[in-house]
Image (cartoon, rainbow, N blue to C red):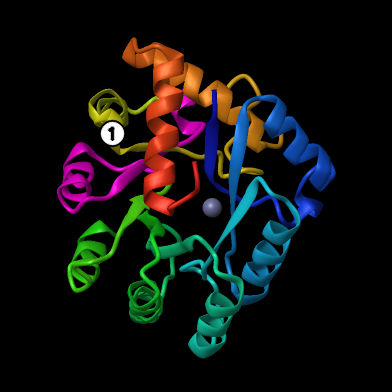
Amino acid sequence: MSLVDTHCHIHDTVDFDLSAEEIVQNALEAGVDRIITVGTDVNDSLAAVKFAEKYQAVSALVGVYPLIETAPNIEEFDKIIIQYRPVGLGDIGLDYHYQPYNRNKQLKLLENLLNLAQKHDLPVSFHVREAFDDFWAVFDNFPKLRGTLHSYTDDVKNMEKGLSRGLYVSINGILTFNKSAELNKVFVQVPLDRIIFETDAPYLAPAPHRGRKNQPAYIAEIAQFFAAKRAVDFAQIAEITTKNAETLFRLSG
Ligand SMILES: [Zn+2]
């Protein structure tokens, strides 16, 4: 049995009470044998790709979080991609949750990064919060893009828009403590061949670890919870979601 954590932030271990070795070892012991660690600005992305070089189980995504203050140098980013070959881009997207936000700046940054994703034919882990109308308008200018809606908490309608565009839906610990009826519908309806799991560690620890630091090993608990919710065999859920992650990020099997 094999599981994949498709989105976490484990390269900066000051955020954890564990060493990098312990984080990776715990994951392997829980059957989580592939981990994708995600950058949120230029320096953090460099840290992510360098961390991934050290651990066989770990791959990296490079990106600039929509709420980052200073616009990155896109050429510098292009060079990081060429030199380190990350398996995709992320966290990138739009986030209008926190006021005030700079809509034009976020849109420009997203477009610049999607140009890079398209140029290098890399999948994207999208961070989209309260911004889906703008997001679809930008996304539809890049018809060849592949990706996933990271930490999806929006409604069924936007899930369907994503599915019709070939996107995957990323499910994390929110599944285990969700109280929204609409989001519950998403968890019940999302097709199995479009789901991937992620922890977003160190954030969003699943029940019963809520309030503590999350880690990739907890993918096993998220997968168990999901299997029970959908009344599908855990082994089958593990197999399908691992295959989905391998397909999207072109991980070797
Ligand atoms: Zn993240």
Q: Residue shown at 51%/89% (left/top)?
A: 75
Q: Residue shown at 32%/15% (left/top)?
A: 230
What residue is pinned by disc 1?
Answer: 193
- Height in image: 180 above or below 55? above
Q: Is residue 206 visible?
A: no
Residue 182 placement (x, y as % from top left): 26, 30
Query: Where, by quadrant of the figure, is residue 41 drawn?
Result: bottom right
- Height in image: 196 above or below 108? above
Q: Is residue 167 visible?
A: yes
Residue 235 placement (x, y as % from top left): 45, 16
Callout 1 amino acid? Asp
Q: Residue shown at 60%/78% (left/top)?
A: 83
Q: Would residue 189 be counted in the magenta stretch?
A: no
The N terminus lies in quadrant = top right
Q: Nearer the viewer, residue 186 or 38?
A: 38
Residue 29 placement (x, y as % from top left): 71, 26
Kind of element beneath mark 1:
helix
Residue 107 placement (x, y as % from top left): 33, 76
Q: Nearer the viewer, residue 79 or 153?
A: 79
- Looking at the rendering, the stretch of residues picked out in magenta corresponds to 152-177
Count of residue discs: 1
- Height in image: 103 above or below 95? below
Q: Residue shown at 66%/44% (left/top)?
A: 202
**In the shown orientation, is residue 79 left or right of residue 88?**
right
